Image (cartoon, grey):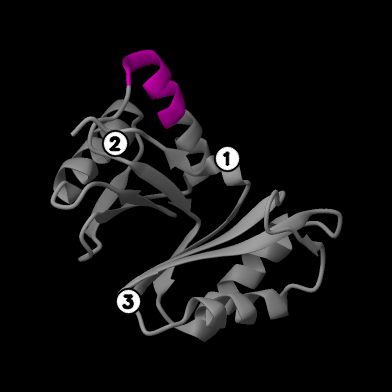
């Protein structure tokens, strides 16, 4: 379980440090920083059984009490962090979807990719073909199957859209 943290170019280290401080030092969760090797992105891996969605809510509470984060622009919770491989992406996304999405729910596949040869349509089609329950809703889904491809690492989450934490930055 991890977080994909976006920042302005050249502020990756600042954003990672800021997120590390809040999640580890203030909130008390074990974390390990990972370099994403892509400008404007960093990855913070949660250690143990902590759920990233719970931590997102804790970060929101921290921001309400103490003020905004400065270097972080967006924090996306990731339930799985795997090596980039289309077959593994499809298997993990389908497994997470099966555990969360009921036949009465709507969903969409949201793919963001950086520095990879995989095509967005290729990933969306492969994942959507494995999910044969619920309904597709591209505008207001109950759940997003979020796939974040960053070079050789892929983060996957099945989440309600409000769990993506969008922040403003003054840097």
Question: Disc 1 on helix, strand or loop?
Answer: helix
* Residue carrying label 1: 162
Label at residue 24: 2
Classify the position of the C terminus by image quarter: top left
Look at the image and give the residue range highlighted in magenta.
59-67
- Asked if residue 63 is among those painted magenta in the image, a careful observer would answer yes
Q: Which quadrant holds residue 81?
A: bottom left
The answer to which of 167 and 31 lies nearer the viewer is 167
- Magenta segment, prevailing SS (helix, strand or loop): helix
Q: Residues within 10 Å of mark 3 (few under 14, many from 20)?
A: some
Question: Disc 3 on helix, strand or loop?
Answer: loop
- CA distance for labels 2 and 1: 23 Å
Mark 3 and mark 1 in contact? Answer it, CB < 8 Å. no
Relative image position of residue 14 (x, y in whole percent): 16, 42
Relative image position of residue 79 (x, y in whole percent): 50, 56
Label at residue 152: 3
Mark 2 and mark 1 in contact? Answer it, CB < 8 Å. no
Q: Which quadrant holds residue 74?
A: top left
**Side (left or right) of 132 relative to 141:** right
**Residue at screen point 63% across, 76% down:** 127
**Residue at screen point 25% across, 40% down:** 20
- Asked if residue 163 is among those painted magenta in the image, a careful observer would answer no
The answer to which of 39 and 54 lies nearer the viewer is 39
Classify the position of the N terminus by image quarter: bottom left
**Residue at screen point 68% across, 74% down:** 128
């Amino acid at each position: 379980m991890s977080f994909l943290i976006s920042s302005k170019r050249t502020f990756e280290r600042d954003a990672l440090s800021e997120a590390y401080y809040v999640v580890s030092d203030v909130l008390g969760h074990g974390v390990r920083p990972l370099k994403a090797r892509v400008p404007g992105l960093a990855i913070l891996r949660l250690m143990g059984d902590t759920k990233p969605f719970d931590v997102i809510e804790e970060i929101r509470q921290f921001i309400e009490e103490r003020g905004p984060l400065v270097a972080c622009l967006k924090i996306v919770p990731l339930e799985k962090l795997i090596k980039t491989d289309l077959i593994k992406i499809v298997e993990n996304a389908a497994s997470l979807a099966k555990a969360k999405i009921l036949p009465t729910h709507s969903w969409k596949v949201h793919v963001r990719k950086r520095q990879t040869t995989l095509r967005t349509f290729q990933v969306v089609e492969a994942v959507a073909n494995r999910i044969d329950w619920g309904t597709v809703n591209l505008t207001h889904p109950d759940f997003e199957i979020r796939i974040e491809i960053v070079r050789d690492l892929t983060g996957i989450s099945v989440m309600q859209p409000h769990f993506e934490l969008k922040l403003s930055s003054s840097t």
